[in-house]
Image: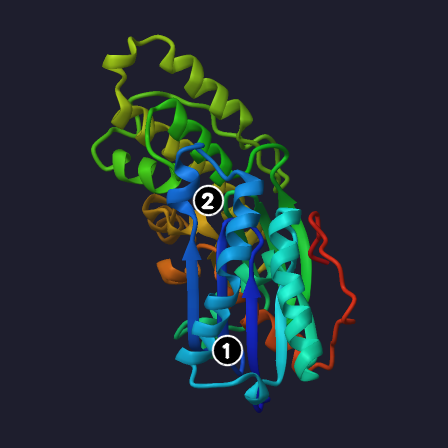
Amino acid sequence: MTKQFSRILAIETSCDETSAAVIENGTTILSNIVASQIDLHAQYGGVFPEVASRRHIEVIYPVVAQALEEAHMGLDDLDCIAVTQGPGLVGSLLVGVNMAKGLALGRGKPLLGVNHIEGHIYSLWLTDAADEIEFPILTLVVSGGHTELYLMTGHGRYQHLGGTLDDAAGEAFDKVGRLLGLPYPGGPAIDKAAQNGSPTAFKFPRAVMDDGFNFSFSGLKTAVMRQTKKFNPDRLPVNDLAASFQAAVVDALVTKTERAAQAYGVTAVHLAGGVSANSALRREMNERVDLPVRVPPLALCTDNAAMIGAAAHWHFVNGRRSNLDIDVIPSMELV
């Protein structure tokens, strides 16, 4: 299949990362600038929405300018402006969407609103494996706000197989991290602590409830909380608790993914989203799933604009455009 050409400026402000990127043909990163707010929100133990949106306003212009500069391009060199339309925090989304609308209107460029989850899925097209990808694919999108399984049968063609019924995996990592006195974000901190702990020290529940493909982590989080109350705070076995909790999350994620891969006869399993950076999840998925398992590099696991540009390319070359009066959709679904 002949590749169709595009140069897209993408903007991502769905949560606490302000990012802009220039993507060529949906697979080549010409620039990808990310201004993180982790240090800003660490004092709260999680993302403070109003603080996040104000910081986006402060940095969005220089981030876009740097992305264009590093790509050695001006706005007139672009074919399209793409932006995350949802899901996400409404105030944060508004900053990115309004910036994109202004740029598109001012330079007469097409505008594309992109689903944030779809962006995570397309982060795999920004890797060396892009030319090897064949449908159907099973994708596990696992992050702070999402734990979803999708069957992808073609570009833009998705079947939602299952998702979290309560806490997302990344959200559970953050909450348990706070229980253990670990720094925010909880995912990397627990992964690091678990290196020095035993995954069998505590027997925590696996939320493998039935033969379906949904997830639940609220009961696991409660089990960890109850276990912490059995110890004096200064004698908390943090490493063992972290390792045992992480093992329970990973087991549930891998078990459901493995079942779905077998049920739908896919060619490969893709991991995406912030929690796909977890070392235990990568290791277990590769060991237990008898298929190619692809994971984006660490820089593309967390929120970034490059993935939004990759997803936008396939919509752009197929003729899709958004109206200049598009609005944010905080609970946007991928259909």
Amino acid type, mark 2: Val
* Residue designated by label 2: 254
Say whether residue 2 is left or right of residue 300: right
The answer to whether 316 is drawn above or below residue 158 in the figure is below
**Residue 315, picture quadrant:** bottom right
Q: Is residue 16 above or below residue 153?
A: above
> Within 10 angstroms of label 2, few (less than 14), some, or many (20 or more) residues?
many
> What residue do we see at 67% from left, 77% from top?
104
Left or right of 216? Residue 221 is left
Give the residue at x 33% y 25%.
181
Q: Residue at x 45, y 50 (%)?
A: 274
Single out the mark in the foreground, 1 or 2.
1
Q: Give the residue pinned by disc 1.
A: 23
The location of residue 130, given as percent across then percent down, is 46, 75
Residue 304 image offset from top left, x and y in percent? 48, 61
Q: Nearer the viewer, residue 119 or 151?
A: 119
Label at residue 124: none
Label 1, label 2: how far apart the Cα atoms are: 32 Å
Q: Is residue 237 above or below residue 323?
A: above
Position of 103 compared to 255: left or right?
right
